[in-house]
Amino acid sequence: MNLKPIGDRLVLKKQEKEEEKTLSGIVLPSSAKEAPVYAEVIAIGSEVEEDEKMKGNIKVGDKVIYSKYAGTEIKLEDNEYILVKYEDVLAVVE
């Protein structure tokens, strides 16, 4: 199944983090930590691709940092995605 964002929206795939272990040996599951604020761009809406100011700033495959409480979380075929507005993307990680 493909997600095609409408307007100035982006589809991001959350980056998974593995469980961490403290120095004393306590395992911290990923559910006990804050949600990540970085993701990979999976799809870009048509307004972002056509607008001269936005065009070329973000491409499919880029790793980005987005606002912590932005977007709508979606789960499709065992994958977690987040649908965010273009303005909610803060930076591209290079």
Image (cartoon, helix red, strand yellow):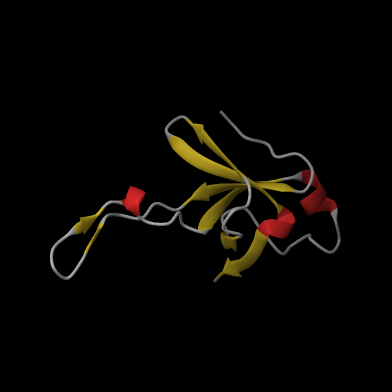
Q: Is residue 10 above or below residue 62?
A: above
Count of labels in the image = 0
Q: Nearer the viewer, residue 69 or 9?
A: 69
Q: Nearer the viewer, residue 39 or 51?
A: 39
Please indicate whether residue 58 sits to the left or right of residue 54 in the image: left
Which residue is found at the position 79% from the left and 61% from the top? 54
Residue at the far right in the pictured view: 52
Place of residue 67 in the rendered image (x, y in percent of width and height, measured from the top left): 61, 59
Place of residue 45 in the rendered image (x, y in percent of width and height, measured from the top left): 74, 45
Q: Quadrant of the N terminus?
A: top right
Which residue is found at the position 79% from the left and 43% from the top? 7
Please indicate whether residue 25 sits to the left or right of residue 50 in the image: left
**Quarter of the image where one finds residue 79:** top left
Please indicate whether residue 91 sits to the left or right of residue 18 in the image: right
Q: Nearer the viewer, residue 76 or 2?
A: 76
Place of residue 55 in the rendered image (x, y in percent of width and height, measured from the top left): 78, 60
Place of residue 85 in the rendered image (x, y in percent of width and height, measured from the top left): 71, 51
Q: Quadrant of the C terminus?
A: bottom right
Please indicate whether residue 40 sits to the left or right of residue 28 in the image: right
Which residue is found at the position 60% from the left and 59% from the top? 66
Q: Is residue 23 above or below residue 59?
A: below
Which residue is found at the position 50% from the left and 34% from the top? 75
